[in-house]
Image: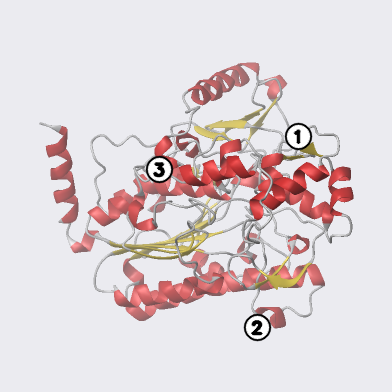
Amino acid sequence: MKPSLLLALWILGSAFCPAASKPNVVFLFADDWGWGDLSSHGHPWLKTPHLDRLAREGTDFHQFNVLNPVCSPSRAAAMTGMFPSRFGIHQHFAAPAQNLARNMPDWLDARAPTVARFFQQAGYRTAHFGKWHLTNRETHGAPAPTAYGFDEFAIFNGGAEMPSAGLHATPDHAVKFIAAHKDRPFFLNVWLHESHLPHVPTKASLEKWKHLDEQQRVYAAVITDGDNAVGRVLDALEAAGVAQNTIVLFSSDNGPETTGTDKGNGRPDAETGESGYGGYYSVGSSGGLRGEKRSLFEGGVRVPFLVRWPGHTPAGAINPTTAFTAVDLLPTLCAAAGITLPPDHRGDGENLLAALQGQPAKRTRPIFWDWTGKAADPHWWPRLAVRDGDWKLLLTADAKRLALHRLTTDRAEAVDVAKDHPEIVARLTQLALAWKATLPTTVDASCISAADRTSASTTATTPAPPNASAKKAAPDRAAAFARIDTNHDGALTLDEYRAGMKDAPNLEQRFKNFDQNGDGKLSRAEFVTPSGK
């Protein structure tokens, strides 16, 4: 039988699955929300009553991993069921010039398999509300969410042509969508801003936590806003009468942000215009796991994962053993909805539906991580990692430095046992390097913004004309770089940055924010095209 006919039969069969086998799906995806940032995970002062309710009514998976320690690649993995490095996505999507310097595309390939498209083709109404970041707001020509299988969307941090929704508008859109489509199956992404910078707490939440100290108050308010958003979505499902036939999932794209020195001053966020606070308030918790955001240690990639599916997923249960990952979501959710993947589908995930149903389930394939960002000690030095069974090996790119941990007995990755298990080190090193060798080394031309990259290359080397518009910041920053780089070595040290910027506020924290790879200096690309993560 011809492949085209097989595909047509698959789409036809999926579209006519009986309604009873089609549960709704709501995927709540938070941002920088640490494993320990739930009161049900033992946090001493944060309160998350709505997430605690979700845990009571569903199952809490304690060994869930995302596939990168920052936003964009982590989200790409959850969308596609494939390791993000297969698409050349190693760090967050920044402005095109910075993507070029990192040998990255400017957006996720719209031809990639996506969980939304599979559900859409099976007759579901699909929507994405909230953060996108599968491109960057400074990028022109990026595909809209509709190109990836979403019927409706309202987003922030999308492409330059996409209107930006407010940070606190995400639940509003989700609530309306649930009410409008309660009589047909739907797949809904609700990707929250909390607890990413800038911190933009509501006045009500700030008032609620006024008894805490300054740092704790802002962070607790942000977590409360995120938890309240979860509660509104759960209430909307109840009001629509569809809660009993809806799979609700909650997770986070990576571990908690590093606490900085920048307090912020309630200044408007550049994208949304809403007031925000700085990194001083980033006091999120990894729950005792080593590392944090940007680290391949568990604190950067092990995150909360709560699943509620009445009548299927055990209520009030904890699953401490199943190594569930973000790439497993696509095959698992499709299986739950009775959607058969096409014959030529080759994903990196496994169908772990048995785990959602409370049955013993063990992931059988290795898990791989690839990271090209911050590389400093003590938690950010690994550039490559592999987990197989209970064992996790972390390596530098050349494999000259490594560490081995048995996660089932050492969740904090406190004890390196590499010297005790040379045979395991050798096997996992070979696995990791062989996998790395399969990854693309060039960028697909269809996934770059040619005009933006040409413009960026020109402005990085050409001074601004006398009457340049104030909106064209790149030429001005290029000229500033040339002025500040007093030794003309193509990089700025902190001392050069301080001297060149003189009396500007929060210079040390701003330097760290620009220093995307954590090497203690600013390249031209990092300075000329800074972008938040």
Answer whether labels 3 and 2 touch (C-beta < 8 Å): no
What distance separates the C-alpha of mark 3 from that of mark 2? 40 Å
Position of residue 201 measured from the top left corner of the image (x, y, whole percent): 66, 74
Q: What colour-coding does the image apply? A: secondary structure
Q: In this view, does 71 lie to the left or right of 214?
A: left
Q: Give the residue at the far left of this rendering.
A: 1
- Tell me which label, 3 or 1, sits earlier in the chain: 3
Q: In this view, does 273 lie to the left or right of 25?
A: right
Q: Mark 2 points at which residue?
A: 204
Position of residue 306 measured from the top left corner of the image (x, y, whole percent): 50, 58
Residue 486 seen from this side: yes
What distance separates the C-alpha of mark 3 from that of mark 1? 32 Å
Residue 288 seen from this side: no
Position of residue 207 measured from the top left corner of the image (x, y, whole percent): 71, 83
- Tell me which label, 2 or 1, sits earlier in the chain: 2
Q: Is residue 67 left or right of residue 18?
A: right
Q: Name the residue under label 3.
A: 109
Answer whether labels 3 and 1 touch (C-beta < 8 Å): no
Q: Mark 1 points at which residue?
A: 490
Q: How crowded is mark 1: few (under 14 residues within 10 Å), some or many (20 or more)?
A: some
- Tell me which label, 3 or 2, sits earlier in the chain: 3
User: Which of the numbered marks, if any, corresponds to residue 358?
Assistant: none
User: What is the secondary structure assignment of the residue under circle 2?
Assistant: helix
On screen, residue 97 above or below 273: above
Label 2 amino acid?
Ala
Label 1 amino acid?
Gly
Judge by depth and name the residue closer to the eye, 162 or 152: 162
Q: How crowded is mark 2: few (under 14 residues within 10 Å), some or many (20 or more)?
A: few
Q: How crowded is mark 3: few (under 14 residues within 10 Å), some or many (20 or more)?
A: many
